[in-house]
Amino acid sequence: MLVGYMRVSPDSDRQSTDLQRDALLAAGVDPLHLFEDHASGAKDDRTGLARALEFVRPGDVLVVWKLARLGRSLSHLLAIVTSLKDNRVAFRSLTENLDTTTPSGEFLFQVFGALAQYERALIQERVVAGLAAARKRGRIRGRPQAITGEKLDAIIAALDGGMSKAAVCRSFGVKRTTLIEILARVGWMGSRGAREADQV
């Protein structure tokens, strides 16, 4: 069974799901199996997506109009598609002509996975370098770091992917003050080049 998901940003009155709906229906999705959100891609509270992911069953195919409608970042997109695959649910994106039921679609997601792994390695390298530089300057002192290893990598990847610091705190169970402290210690910079610790 084909299950469709569509999303538009609430920031634009000009946007509607009509274009996405028409494309999904033309692809064979039943109108009763369509789920939608009017939310920013960076937001975690997408009830339509949550309902779609709960609705799909083994053998189903989750269909979207564009990859950007599903994931807020490459790592987030891969996490969703990997979860679908683990539950024997396929994924199809109409605009990119990507279908995990085909060998070429499966291969492309393997490439995406390798790129995401490379991105995580770069983040880890940057974190280690930042900690080393902070130690050199005597800036790391006091109690031990509360966020370590893979959790820190995941947090930085989420922030780099556009997740808000408030959403990171909720998702990872981290206190706001702890997040600010850790970002300052590793020297993580915001997308505009300003120190994130000063922007929270």
Image (cartoon, rainbow, N blue to C red):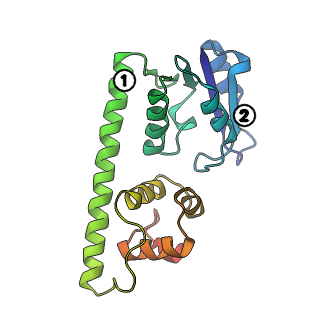
Q: Earlier in the sequence, mark 2 or mark 1?
A: 2
Q: Quadrant of residue 18?
A: top right
In the image, which disc is placed on residue 16?
2
Q: Looking at the image, is 147 positioned above or below residue 25?
A: below
The amino acid beneath tag 2 is Ser
Residue 200 shows in this picture: no
SS at badge 2? loop
10 Å neighbourhood of mark 2: few (<14), some, or many (≥20)?
A: some
* Of the pair 197 and 155, the residue shown nearer to us: 155
Which residue is pictured at 70% across the width and 49% down the height? 11
Which residue is label 1 attached to?
106
The amino acid beneath tag 1 is Glu
* Of the pair 13 and 29, the residue shown nearer to us: 29
Which residue is pictured at 26% across the width and 77% down the height? 133
**Dividing the image into 4 quarters, which one contains the N terminus?**
top right
With 107 as the anchor, is 171 left or right in this view?
right
**Dividing the image into 4 quarters, which one contains the C terminus?**
bottom right
SS at badge 1? helix
Which residue is pictured at 46% across the width and 25% down the height? 96
Location of residue 151 in the rendering, given as x and y in whole percent from the top left corner: 41, 58
Location of residue 161 in the rendering, given as x and y in whole percent from the top left corner: 47, 52
Q: Quadrant of residue 136?
A: bottom left
Judged by depth in the image, the label closer to the viewer, 2 or 1, is 1
Disc 2/disc 1 C-alpha distance (Å): 30 Å
Residue 27 shows in this picture: yes
